[in-house]
Image (cartoon, rainbow, N blue to C red):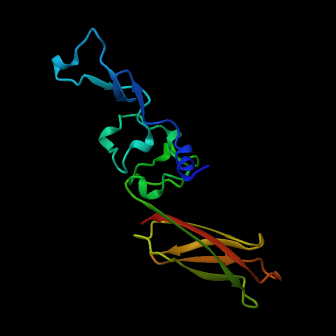
Amino acid sequence: MNKARRITRGRGRRPFRRYPGRFRTSVYRGASSGHSGTDQGESEYKLAEDTIGANHLRHRSVRSQAIEDYSVYSIHLSPESITSSKIATQSVDLAHLNFTPVQGITDRPLMQQFGILPFVFPEGESMIDITVPLQTPYMDHSYVMVVSCSDPIFHAGVRSCNELQGIVGITRPEGSNCAAGYLSWIAIGGQ
C-alpha cells in the first residue's frame, strides 16, 4: 500500500458528494420547492442535520452567549471540577451541609480553638492553676471554654478568662498518688 493510500485511509468519507450536473457539498440541501427563501432574504441553501461536528469548531469559538440558559446539568461536570475558588462567598449555608456546624449569633463569625496541655501537681498540693494561652485572641472575654482531664480523679474548671488566655483550676483528692495528667480544652467565641 502506498503512502497516499495510508494517509487517506483513516480519514473516512469524502467531504462532498457528486450530484447530477455539478458538485455540491454534502452539508447543503436545496430549499423546499413550495417555499422560496430568497423572498425573505434567506439563502437558497440550508445546513443538513448532523453535518457540523466538534472537529469543525475553532478553539474558543463557542462563547457563553451561545450557550442556552439552563442547558448545563450536573452530569456535564467532571469530578472535582468545582473548587473553592469557583464558589462565591456566603453561597454555602446550613441547608447545603451534611453536618451541623457550631452555630452562634447570626451577625458574628465564630472561631474555635482547642489544645492539650500537660500538668504536674507539686508534692503536697491538692490544687493548681494552669494558664491556657490562646493562639488567636478573641474580641473580648465572652467566649466559652470547656475543659476536661485525662484521668477522672482530677476535676477541672475555668476560673477566669480574657482575650488572650484562660485560667483553669485543677483539683485532686487529698492523699492521691496521681500527680500528673493532661488537660484538654476547647474555646469557642466571636472573632
Q: Nearer the viewer, residue 136 or 53?
A: 53
Residue 19: give x, y in percent of width and height. 39, 23
Please give the count of numbered marks on the rendered protein. 0
Q: Residue at x 45, y 75 (%)?
A: 137
Q: Is residue 10 visible?
A: no
Q: Nearer the viewer, residue 38 or 73?
A: 38
- The answer to whether residue 95 is above or below residue 188 is above
Q: In which quarter of the image is the C terminus?
A: bottom left
State which quadrant residue 148 falls in.
Answer: bottom right
Q: Residue at x 58, y 49 (%)?
A: 99
- The answer to whether residue 141 is above or below residue 102 is below
Q: Residue furthest bottom?
A: 123
Q: Nearer the viewer, residue 68 or 123?
A: 68
Q: Is residue 145 left or right of residue 51?
A: right
State which quadrant residue 158 falls in.
Answer: bottom right
Q: Which of 143 and 4 is in front in this view?
A: 4
Residue 133: give x, y in percent of width and height. 53, 80
Q: Can residue 71 be seen in this view?
A: yes
Residue 75: give x, y in percent of width and height. 53, 39
Q: In this view, does 74 lie to the left or right of 89?
A: right
Q: Which residue is drawn at 42% across and 54% down?
A: 86
Q: Is residue 146 left or right of residue 135?
A: right
State which quadrant residue 159 falls in.
Answer: bottom right
Q: Is residue 100 left or right of residue 91?
A: right
Residue 117: give x, y in percent of width and height. 65, 79
Q: Residue at x 61, y 73 (%)?
A: 115
- The answer to whether residue 146 is above or below residue 35 is below
